[in-house]
Image (spheres, helix red, strand yellow):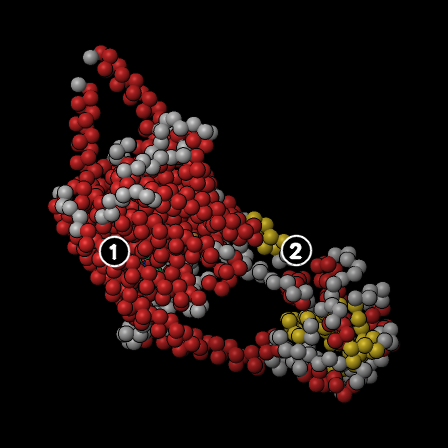
């Protein structure tokens, strides 16, 4: 009797979670093309295709594209993980809906701020620029942007706390962090996704709290007129920004651990090494962000050194363990390569490539040369666009295919993947070359002295076009299955 | 677009205007930015103990602070040297052997090494080897040398004195690193100059503005840095995260156990 009741509950949860996932992932089909095309537009402007393009528009587009992409992939990562987690624990559907509503409000405010208000301080709105716009954008645009972020911050904090709550209902903290594995035990068994998501949510909370502190300081400045300490503001904004970007990648990795085994028919279990790697991440997640402040010579020297070593140690264990395990999963195995599993796997490899580029730039000696050159967008577009975005897109396809029962068109899938790979890595290699030539980032039009930037942007246009076709094909195949899943 | 250009033009105007003002005031005090990193002439000097040497001989050993005076001066010279001495002692403490020199040269052709020796004694500096008082060995070179520092002097018959500004120039490897002007040398400014002639990077400087929640408090008098409240703020998120995480796990865990108990009870009852 009790068993039947439990089963009925499980079915009900599945329906609820499925609906939630469908609606949330639907957002991707709208926002990703828009934000991606804004990226395309920026490359066109940088390639001097529209010489009369107003630079202040470039900057508001840059800001919207940046913050939009960072936010979009965080929420999509969250919903993917919530869907996958619901096999083990029960995050509240109500909280996800609450978060959905507030996310829409926050996004609307940010769109108004950047498009109508021309807010263009860049996605991480480095203090004191937001309120010192030289009248390019009005102060209300900054107000809206910060309020928008505040709304998102509240929605997402509640969201991650709820996921932690769901985990805490079944596991104690040391079980969820796999400390018993570190002590040599394997009971109770902990699915790796629980470990990774626990680490991610704890990291997320610190990051969001840093954002709260930052927004309060902005408010204090705005109301009292007493300027804040730019050093403190920069520390806080990168604390938040770095953590947000990194936890999004961890969400992608959580997807990998949970989905890839379904295509290889091999289990992927937590072990001592996995436990060690993710606990290292948890321990170091607060310290790596110091690598964003290498140029700030007033920052205490100890922080700079900690930043460099934390950057190495946070990325290496997690990435190495994950990548080798993923390779071991597919080695000498008959993998069911669909559009979904291919993208998830290739996303993992992109994460690795981007990670290497990031570690290079987080070495102080290198950062002296590469700071704020195109190397920066090069590496983060690698682990985002060719990394976590592919993982999440792979998940959305995986999910839609599962629920629609439309079989995979493997030829079309292969073609799509090749277009995305060629277009994506071509696009990235232009950024990397720009970085190696010390072309600075965030230029709307490159001045004559940086004409190589213009040329690279022009070549880039070819690749972005290929990429766009690739994503278009992806969308066609996925939306068809997604629509059938309702 | 128009706005951007206007802003740039406006900024340009301000910059130009400032340049204009500074060029005018250069007639009174040298403007540091015009002379910085220029080489000075390697002139021969005769020190107060009658040694012939050259400035390059000095800068090859240690960096130095250079100041120009004349011994009969009834105006700025003595107070300038006194305040320099006071500030240096404040900065370097009781250090006998400093890692820089202080070179005091007379631009007055009438001054002799003996005059400079007397001047040095008057200031209670005769025991100090790092203070080098002297005159130009070649009187012809004085004008060119001082011109290249932006320093000037005029004989005023009515008072029987030279009119001249007070300057202290920081020299490293024969190049001008900083120029301080005026009769009073403050500890705060001099500390920066001394750091710079030694080749140290000066990351901090005094700001008058009131800034909320500073990460670091810099005391320009002592050059010391103290951790401020801003640094503590950076740790607050981590602290609260611990708190929240533990709370979640402790509370959910408890509720979970209670639920389990009541469920087993129900099952037993059934
Ligand atoms: C769809 C293909 C994409 C294209 C064509 C594209 C293009 C661009 C371009 C041209 C820039 C400006 C680079 C510069 O500083 O000169 C940029 C910046 C940026 N992009 Fe993308 N991008 C794409 C996807 C993504 C994705 C998936 C993310 C995910 C987070 C992302 C996040 C960012 C961020 C954070 C910035 C920096 C914004 C800032 O400087 O404030 N982009 N992108
Ligand atoms: Cu970072």
Quarter assignment of residue A381: bottom left
Question: In this orientation, which residue lies closer to the viewer: B156 or B35?
Answer: B35
Q: Which residue is mark 2?
A: B222
Q: Is residue A407 left or right of residue A309?
A: left
Q: Is residue A131 visible?
A: no
Q: Residue at x 32, y 58 (%)?
A: A66
- Report if the beta carbon of the residue with label 1 is closer than 8 angstroms to ligand 1: no
- A351 w.r.t. B112: above or below: above
Q: Residue at x 62, y 58 (%)?
A: B220
Image position, residue B269 (x, y; %): 22, 11
Q: CA distance from mark 1 to mark 2?
A: 63 Å
Quarter assignment of residue A44: bottom left
- Image quarter hosting the N terminus of chain B: bottom left
Ligand 1 appears in which quadrant?
A: bottom left
Q: Residue at x 48, y 46 (%)?
A: A313
Q: Chain of mark 2?
A: B
Question: In this orientation, which residue lies closer to the viewer: A31 or A119?
Answer: A31
Q: Looking at the rendered structure, which numbered label has been put on residue A392? A: none
Q: Circle 2 — which element?
A: loop
Label 1: few (<14), some or many (≥20) within 10 Å? many
Image position, residue A289 (x, y; %): 45, 51
- A392 w.r.t. A160: above or below: below
Q: Residue at x 26, y 14 (%)?
A: B265
Image position, residue A284 (x, y; %): 47, 44
The residue sitting at the top extreme is B269
Q: Is residue A166 visible?
A: yes
Q: Which residue is mark 1?
A: A417
Image position, residue A318 (x, y; %): 42, 44
Question: In this orientation, which residue lies closer to the viewer: A231 or A52?
Answer: A52
Label 2: few (<14), some or many (≥20) within 10 Å? few
Q: Is residue A479 left or right of residue A429?
A: left
Question: In this orientation, which residue lies closer to the viewer: A93 or B180?
Answer: A93
């Amino acid at each position: 009797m009790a068993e039947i009741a439990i089963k009925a509950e499980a079915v009900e949860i599945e329906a609820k979670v499925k609906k939630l996932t469908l609606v949330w992932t639907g957002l991707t089909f709208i926002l990703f093309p828009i934000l991606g095309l804004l990226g395309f537009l920026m490359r066109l402007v940088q390639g001097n295709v529209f010489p009369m393009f107003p630079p202040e528009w470039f900057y508001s587009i840059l800001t919207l594209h940046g913050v939009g992409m960072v936010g979009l992939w965080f929420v999509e990562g969250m919903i993917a993980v919530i869907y996958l987690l619901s096999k083990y624990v029960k995050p509240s559907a109500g909280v996800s809906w609450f978060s959905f509503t507030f996310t829409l409000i926050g996004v609307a405010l940010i769109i108004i701020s950047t498009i109508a208000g021309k807010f263009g301080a860049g996605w991480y709105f480095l203090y004191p620029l937001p309120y010192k716009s030289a009248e390019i954008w009005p102060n209300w645009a900054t107000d809206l942007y910060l309020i928008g972020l505040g709304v998102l911050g509240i929605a997402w904090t509640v969201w991650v706390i709820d996921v932690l709550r769901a985990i805490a209902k079944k596991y104690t903290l040391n079980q969820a962090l796999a400390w018993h594995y570190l002590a040599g035990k394997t009971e109770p068994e902990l699915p790796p996704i629980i470990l990774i998501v626990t680490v991610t949510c704890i990291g997320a909370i610190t990051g969001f709290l840093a954002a709260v502190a930052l927004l309060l300081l902005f408010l204090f400045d705005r109301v009292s007129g007493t300027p804040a300490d730019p050093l403190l503001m920069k520390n806080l904004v990168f604390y938040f920004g770095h953590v947000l970007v990194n936890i999004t990648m961890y969400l992608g990795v959580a997807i990998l651990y949970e989905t890839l085994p379904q295509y290889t028919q091999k289990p992927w279990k937590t072990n001592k090494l996995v436990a060690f790697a993710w606990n290292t991440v948890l321990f170091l997640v607060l310290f790596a962000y110091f690598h964003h402040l290498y140029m700030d010579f007033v920052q205490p020297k100890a922080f700079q050194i900690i930043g460099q070593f934390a950057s190495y140690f946070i990325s290496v264990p997690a990435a190495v363990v994950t990548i080798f395990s993923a390779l071991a999963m597919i080695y000498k195995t008959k993998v069911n390569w669909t559009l979904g599993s291919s993208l998830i796997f290739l996303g993992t490899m992109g994460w690795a490539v981007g990670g290497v580029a990031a570690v290079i730039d987080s070495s102080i000696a290198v950062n002296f040369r590469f700071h704020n050159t195109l190397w920066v967008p090069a590496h983060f577009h690698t682990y985002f666009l060719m990394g976590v975005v592919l993982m999440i897109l792979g998940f959305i396809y995986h999910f839609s295919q599962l629920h629609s029962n439309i079989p995979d068109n493997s030829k079309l899938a292969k073609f799509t993947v090749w277009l995305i790979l060629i277009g994506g890595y071509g696009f990235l290699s232009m950024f990397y070359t720009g970085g190696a030539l010390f072309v600075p980032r965030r230029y709307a039009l490159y001045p004559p002295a940086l004409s190589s930037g213009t040329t690279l942007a022009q070549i880039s246009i070819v690749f972005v076009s290929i990429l766009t076709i690739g994503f278009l094909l992806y969308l066609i195949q996925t939306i068809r299955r997604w629509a059938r899943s309702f | 677009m128009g706005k951007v250009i206007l802003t740039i033009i406006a900024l340009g105007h301000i910059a130009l205007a400032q340049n204009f003002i500074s060029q005018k005031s250069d007639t009174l005090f040298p403007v540091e930015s015009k002379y910085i990193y220029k080489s000075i002439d390697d002139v021969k000097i005769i020190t107060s103990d009658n040694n012939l040497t050259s400035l390059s001989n000095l800068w090859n050993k240690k960096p130095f602070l250079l100041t120009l005076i004349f011994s009969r001066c009834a105006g700025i010279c003595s107070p300038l040297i006194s305040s320099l001495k006071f500030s240096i002692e404040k900065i370097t403490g009781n250090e006998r052997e400093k890692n820089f020199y202080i070179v005091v040269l007379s631009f007055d052709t009438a001054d002799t090494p003996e005059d400079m020796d007397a001047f040095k004694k008057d200031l209670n500096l005769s025991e100090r080897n790092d203070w080098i008082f002297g005159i130009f060995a070649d009187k012809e070179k004085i004008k060119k040398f001082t011109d290249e520092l932006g320093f000037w002097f005029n004989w005023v018959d009515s008072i029987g004195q030279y009119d001249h500004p007070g300057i202290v120039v920081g020299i490293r490897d024969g190049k001008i690193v900083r120029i301080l002007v005026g009769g009073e040398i403050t500890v705060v400014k001099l500390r920066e100059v001394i750091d710079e002639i030694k080749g140290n990077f000066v990351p901090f400087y005094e700001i008058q503005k009131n800034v909320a929640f500073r990460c670091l408090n810099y005391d320009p008098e002592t050059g010391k840095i103290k951790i401020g409240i801003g640094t503590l703020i950076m740790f607050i998120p981590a602290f609260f995260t611990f708190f929240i995480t533990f709370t979640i796990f402790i509370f959910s865990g408890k509720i979970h156990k209670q639920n389990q108990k009541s469920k087993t009870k129900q099952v037993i009852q059934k």
